[in-house]
Image (cartoon, rainbow, N blue to C red):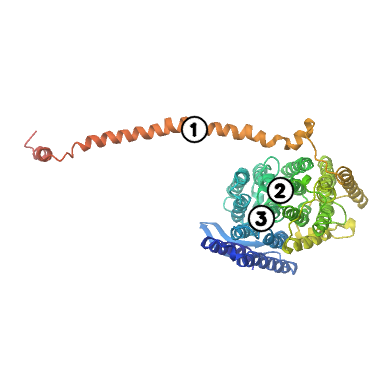
Amino acid sequence: MISFIVLLPFLSAALMSVVYLSNTNTKHYAFYTTVGIGAPVLSTLLSFMTGYELLSGSDTVRSTLFEWVNIGDFNISVAFMADRLSVVMLSFITLIGTLIHIYAAGYMKDDPAYGKFFSYFNLFMGSMLLLVLADNPIMMFIGWELVGLCSYLLIGFYHKESANISAANKAFILNRIGDFGFIMGISLLFVSLEGSGFTFETIETNIHLIDHDTLSLIGLLLFVGAMGKSAQIPLYVWLPDAMAGPTPVSALIHAATMVTAGVYMVARYSFLYVEIPDIGLFIASIGAGSALFAAIIASYQNDIKKILAYSTMSQLGYMFIAVGLGAYGSGIFHVFTHAFFKALLFMGAGAVIIALHHEQNIFKMGGLKRELKLVYITMFIATLAISGIPPFAGFFSKDAILVAAFASEHYFIWGVGSLTAMLTAFYMFRLLFTVFHAEASEIKKLHALPKSMTYPLVFLAFGSATAGFLGLNAAYGGSSWINNFLALPESELHLAHSTEYMLGALNVLLAFLGMGLAYKMFAKNMREVQADTFMKKLVINKFYIDEIYAFFALKPLLVLSRFIANVIDPKIFDGFINLSVLGYTRAAFLFAKLQNSKVRYYALYILAGISAISYYMLFKLGVLS
């Protein structure tokens, strides 16, 4: 059963590819839609069946397709494992992925490459499911690399525009940098275990065989991979440019697939990270820095999709704060709730973009509250959720993370997280008020939206409003069901309920402060921020990080490559090759003189040969001495 959760999206992607390559006629719309959506629907059903089996008492469900590598005691199988962590991930990857597929059917309907899009889309989903269900680090790495490939294909989907190809290349290359650290960490882990088994279960059993320093290095190298995949400082710059792809791609990347892979990986290796809390603190610090940094930039962006992209980076920072401080259940809980409201925000943004004929600048929108009533209501719910307003989902998961930071006495990280919560409310309500409330400069005729683009928003709005109750803790009258189900290592909290109420109230107060500031500045009139001071210019230009990378990394590489291309290659490599060719040419010229078509020369060669052989034989017989 769990094998088909992964195989169905892969098989559907292969089938659609064959049909598309054999006939690109868009009349196959019904076929692509049926196969493209049918596979994730079936995977969703199988995922919930697997979850039900675990709820019934099973700890783990396994499926082995075949043995891949068998050398001595070393064995790697193409195998899948579903445990409680996997099932929670499967639940939203497949469910929300299916809703995004339905939405994409309406969004991409008129695209001539509709079949190719769904083939890539299902390949992307299958790759993420492979990553989550992998039984061992090698299988996880295959899924890890495949999601990187799929992001490249989908970000650069509109490949006729050079900017889109540049964005795809940027995502691919920066992820390769992170993946180099990831594969080094896996390799060091394998060598350190000395062939004692390489499934996650055997690694956890034998983790005590590795000394602390080596374990710290392994944990750090693995997290380098997470930095790239989950867009954390300093490998985050690909994520805003990834908005070059179609909006359904952005929704899938940010809500259900690629960027959550890094958080999942750290949680999967929780048995390793609990042994190295110093590396965990480093992870939490990177998360806190990324959360605040991205929130500041998002507050000054004008592109609706880039605001949401920086928002994702910021929310991922919260997740890394949690897993870094040992609150793995709280981190995965925020991954779960975030999937609902972030998918909704991107899909709502996509609906606005389509309605306004592909306009993305929020200051060229305005006044859409009445015309796009359903989109407005659902996006309003998602905005409340991400801003941490109770009782919406984001409040409970974000509050759990900030409580964990406060209880572990990392007050600076807690303070950064709380400040970020205020900024989150500010930039999200800035977006909402500007797009839907502020008076538009001109009245535009809106493009009609298909129902396949609006109905999924309602379901996601319901999830954004209610998913948080699955993690309701004792302070709020719950039992942290999702944490108990996950059964991950969790740092113990020693806080009175009254303290938790005060921290929660402070978070809500800060959120209302950000909301109020956004209302005052943007609810009535368009107020596009001008770069009239150095600080504003610095933030609007994203602290010039891209330019710094270009100057200190790209420019030296370009200079080096030109030197190699213009000096090393032609004068050394080509010179050596040409010299060798010249030697062969001259030797060939000399040998050619022997073949000159003149019989007397051939007779001379024969006579010379016979003479030489005769001399040799007479010498051997002793006639000559």
Above/below status of 528 relative to 133? above
- Say few, some or many: other residues with alpha carbon within 10 Å of mark 2 (under 14 / 14 to 19 / 20 or more): many
Q: Where, by quadrant of the figure, is residue 169 drawn?
A: top right
Above/below status of 337 relative to 574? below
Q: Amino acid at mark 3?
A: Thr
Q: Secondary structure at mark 2?
A: helix
Q: Alpha-carbon distance for marks 3 and 1?
A: 50 Å
- Point out the frontmost of discs 3 and 2: 2
The residue at 85%/58% (across/down) is: 472
Q: Secondary structure at mark 1?
A: helix
Give the labeled residue for mark 2. 273
Q: Amino acid at mark 2?
A: Tyr
Q: How many marks?
A: 3
Please report whichever mark, 3 or 2, sits nearer to the chain's N-terminal start.
Answer: 3
- Say few, some or many: other residues with alpha carbon within 10 Å of mark 3 (under 14 / 14 to 19 / 20 or more): few
Determine contact: label 3, label 2, CB under 8 Å: no
Apparent side of residue 259 relative to residue 142 in the rendered image (left or right): right
Please report whichever mark, 3 or 1, sits nearer to the chain's N-terminal start.
Answer: 3
> In the rendered view of the protein, which quadrant contains the N terminus?
bottom right
Q: Which mark is residue 205?
A: 3
Residue 516 visible here: yes
Q: Where, by quadrant of the figure, is residue 529 drawn?
A: top right
Q: Alpha-carbon distance for marks 1 and 2?
A: 43 Å
Q: Quick one: which residue is furthest to the left in this view?
A: 623
Q: Alpha-carbon distance for marks 3 and 2?
A: 14 Å
Give the labeled residue for mark 1. 564
Q: Amino acid at mark 1?
A: Ile
- Point out the frontmost of discs 1 and 2: 1
